[in-house]
Amino acid sequence: MLEELDIGHKSLNVLDALSSLETAISSAKKKNLVAIKVVHGSGSGTIRKAVRAWGKEQEGRFKAVVWGEDYNMFNKDAVMMRSELVDKKDKDFNRKNSGITIFWL
């Protein structure tokens, strides 16, 4: 299952956004979810940059972190992650959406 976490439309500061992300990922692992799609928006880019930097800092914790711009059929991590999903419908796949980042758990 792919769960969505929207932290981009809640007027959160960076620390609160990252705290929400950490909580959601911990909870998702307990629920045996395949991935979390983080909607951080594109706006000023502050939260997007923080989410992606945090993902890089957590190297080894996730199978992959896929940026929305790379979430397509040509990205091997995106394709492999999607192969684990029961419901493969996702409006953001192949859309080059810079407002999202996928954490493959």
Image (cartoon, helix red, strand yellow):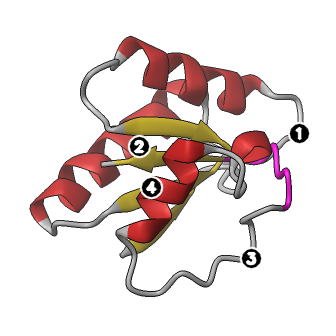
User: Marks 3 and 1: which is nearer the front?
Assistant: 3
* Residue identifier under label 2: 21
User: Marks 2 and 4: which is nearer the front?
Assistant: 4
**96 falls in the magenta region:** yes
* Residue identifier under label 1: 43
In space, the residues marked 1 and 4 are separated at their CA atoms by: 29 Å
> What kind of residue is marked 1?
Gly
Which badge, 3 or 1, is on the more N-terminal residue? 1
Q: Is residue 69 left or right of residue 86?
A: right
In space, the residues marked 2 and 3 are separated at their CA atoms by: 21 Å
> What kind of residue is marked 3?
Lys
**In the depicted view, which residue is nearer to us: 80 or 33?**
80
* Residue identifier under label 4: 80
Q: Is residue 72 left or right of residue 57?
A: right
In space, the residues marked 4 and 3 are separated at their CA atoms by: 17 Å
Of helix, strand and loop, which one carries label 3?
Answer: loop
Q: Residue at x 56, y 29 (%)?
A: 51
Which badge, 4 or 3, is on the more N-terminal residue? 4
User: Marks 2 and 3: which is nearer the front?
Assistant: 3
**In the depicted view, which residue is nearer to us: 16 or 76?**
76
Labels 1 and 2 touching (C-beta < 8 A)? no
Magenta-highlighted residues: 95-100
Q: Residue at x 61, y 84 (%)?
A: 89
* Residue identifier under label 3: 91
In space, the residues marked 3 and 1 are separated at their CA atoms by: 20 Å
Q: Residue at x 54, y 57 (%)?
A: 79
